[in-house]
Image (cartoon, rainbow, N blue to C red):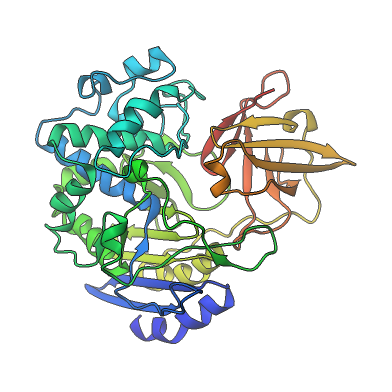
């Protein structure tokens, strides 16, 4: 595998317009690593295998680890209300605030709005202030326990539970309970720690069709660290974290097996993701289930996969470009050769659109950061994305408009690919012929009109 990575990584990132990538593979007890490209197009600093990339929401697996360590010590029960550990916990919906449990948070079934990237403090009190000042204003978009809807804010609440039960800020817990025991040498829990290493910056396109440029900020807001706004590391250090799950060194085997038991189904949009366990995503293949998580920040994307029965772990870290297409070819080859896993073929627009009820489709779907408006013009389906807050405009500076095609009677697919893939979205729970939710990007966005 080492020889193949050395021969192909630079070629593949050039093919897909990715400024830099770092990959690490654990197979047959050996770790292979490779890196190529530049970490920052403005400076030309080259990527090395020790370079740090942000891992985004892969951080949620680290937060999950902290929570399950507390469960193992008898300090936390996943099925007791959050208020037993955070007595002042509030949400916009009082019934949910009183009943929601850590299990709901770990499985993304709490139903309250999760994408409130609202800054509080850059200090050790950032998580505390987010839970105290921001979370109480988050709307209940989906009934508690009704289904999977990806929730960043829920993991901030989990991080706050860990802080309260341990009496230390989240970044210290990450280092003390994971990084130090695993002897990780290339991990940054805060931006000023990243300065001690060769660190990647993200690259974004300010508008459709524009060339990549350096992202306007290095990270998302500090307060969302437990959800994935800050943590950065080398690919090989993330592989070491994966090996700890294969070897059961941070948690016992029984606990790990519980994490990988399916808790909730994921609505079909295409791809291998089928179910969610406790914190972990469960992917499906002809070989059987495998596990992991993806992560995305401002212009950086990360992918982490474990195939336990083959002893395989794979990490791919990137900083912009057509990362989904790179994942398909690069990770697809590695998983096939090391674990016998074939990635699902991503859906593409059909030559002839399927029949779909336009009344089901048309509407405005509201999120805390973005609004998606679906309309029909001259028989064609169009979607306009727009940011609804100043914070959201960091991620989407200008409204974006693109055409959709009916994939089947309940799914739409983007006519044009972005980052190497055609986005698929599912219209769910029709009432009187109109969809109640648009499932997109892992979230259930309620109809707002």
Q: Residue furthest right?
A: 378
- Left or right: 403 in relation to 214: right
The picture quadrant where one finds residue 184 is bottom left
Res. 230 in view: yes
Q: Tell me the quarter of the image containing the N terminus.
A: bottom left
Residue 204 percent location from the top left of the image = 56, 61
Q: Along the line of sight, which residue is nearer the eye, 83 or 443?
A: 83
In the image, residue 363 above or below residue 246: above
Q: Along the line of sight, which residue is nearer the eye, 400 or 23?
A: 400
Residue 19 percent location from the top left of the image = 50, 73
In the image, residue 144 above or below residue 8: above
Q: Residue furthest left?
A: 73
Residue found 25% across the figure and 34% down from its top:
160
- Left or right: 235 in relation to 345: left
Residue found 26% across the figure and 54% down from its top:
189
Residue 280 percent location from the top left of the image = 34, 46
Res. 263 in view: no
In the image, residue 356 above or below residue 215: above
The picture quadrant where one finds residue 373 is top right
Q: Tell me the quarter of the image containing the C terminus.
A: top right
Residue found 25% across the figure and 19% down from its top:
83
In the image, residue 395 above or below residue 266: below
Q: Along the line of sight, which residue is nearer the eye, 309 or 226?
A: 226
Residue 136 percent location from the top left of the image = 40, 22
């Amino acid at each position: 595998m080492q020889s193949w990575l050395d021969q192909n990584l630079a070629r593949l990132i050039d093919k897909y317009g990715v400024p830099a990538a770092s990959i690490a593979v654990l197979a047959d007890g050996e770790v292979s690593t490779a890196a190529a490209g530049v970490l920052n197009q403005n400076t030309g600093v080259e990527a090395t295998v020790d370079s740090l990339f942000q891992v985004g929401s892969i951080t949620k697996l680290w937060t999950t680890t902290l929570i399950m360590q507390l469960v193992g010590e008898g300090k936390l029960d996943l099925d007791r209300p959050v208020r037993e550990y955070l007595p002042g916990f509030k949400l916009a919906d009082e019934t949910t605030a009183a009943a929601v449990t850590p299990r709901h948070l770990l499985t993304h079934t709490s139903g309250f709005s999760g994408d409130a990237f609202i800054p509080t403090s850059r200090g050790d009190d950032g998580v505390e202030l987010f839970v105290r000042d921001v979370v109480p204003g988050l709307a209940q978009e989906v009934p508690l326990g009704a289904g999977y809807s990806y929730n960043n804010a829920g993991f901030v609440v989990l991080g706050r539970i860990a802080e309260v039960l341990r009496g230390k800020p989240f970044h210290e817990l990450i280092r003390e309970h994971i990084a130090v025991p695993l002897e990780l040498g290339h991990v940054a829990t805060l931006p000023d720690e990243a300065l001690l290493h060769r660190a990647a910056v993200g690259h974004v396109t300010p508008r459709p069709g524009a060339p990549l440029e350096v992202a306007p900020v290095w990270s998302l807001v500090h307060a969302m660290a437990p959800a994935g706004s800050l943590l950065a590391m080398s690919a090989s250090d993330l592989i070491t974290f994966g090996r700890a799950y294969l070897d059961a060194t941070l948690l016992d085997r029984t606990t790990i097996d519980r994490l990988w038991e399916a808790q909730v189904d994921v609505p079909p949009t295409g791809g291998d993701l089928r179910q969610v366990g406790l914190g972990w995503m469960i992917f499906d293949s002809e070989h059987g289930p495998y596990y992991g998580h993806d992560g995305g920040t401002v212009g950086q994307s990360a992918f982490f996969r474990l195939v336990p029965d083959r002893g395989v772990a794979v990490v791919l870290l990137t900083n912009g470009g057509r990362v989904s297409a790179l994942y398909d070819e690069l990770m697809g080859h590695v998983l096939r050769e090391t674990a016998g896993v074939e990635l699902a073929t991503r859906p593409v627009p059909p030559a002839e659109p399927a029949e779909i009820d336009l009344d089901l489709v048309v509407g405005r779907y509201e999120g805390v950061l973005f609004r998606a408006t679906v309309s029909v013009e001259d028989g064609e389906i169009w979607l306009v994305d727009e940011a609804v807050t100043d914070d959201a405009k960091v991620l989407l500076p200008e409204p974006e408009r693109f055409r959709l095609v009916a994939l089947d009677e309940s799914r739409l697919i983007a006519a044009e690919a972005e980052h190497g893939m055609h986005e698929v979205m599912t219209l769910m729970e029709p009432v009187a012929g109109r969809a109640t939710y648009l499932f997109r990007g892992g979230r259930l966005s309620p109809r707002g009109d």
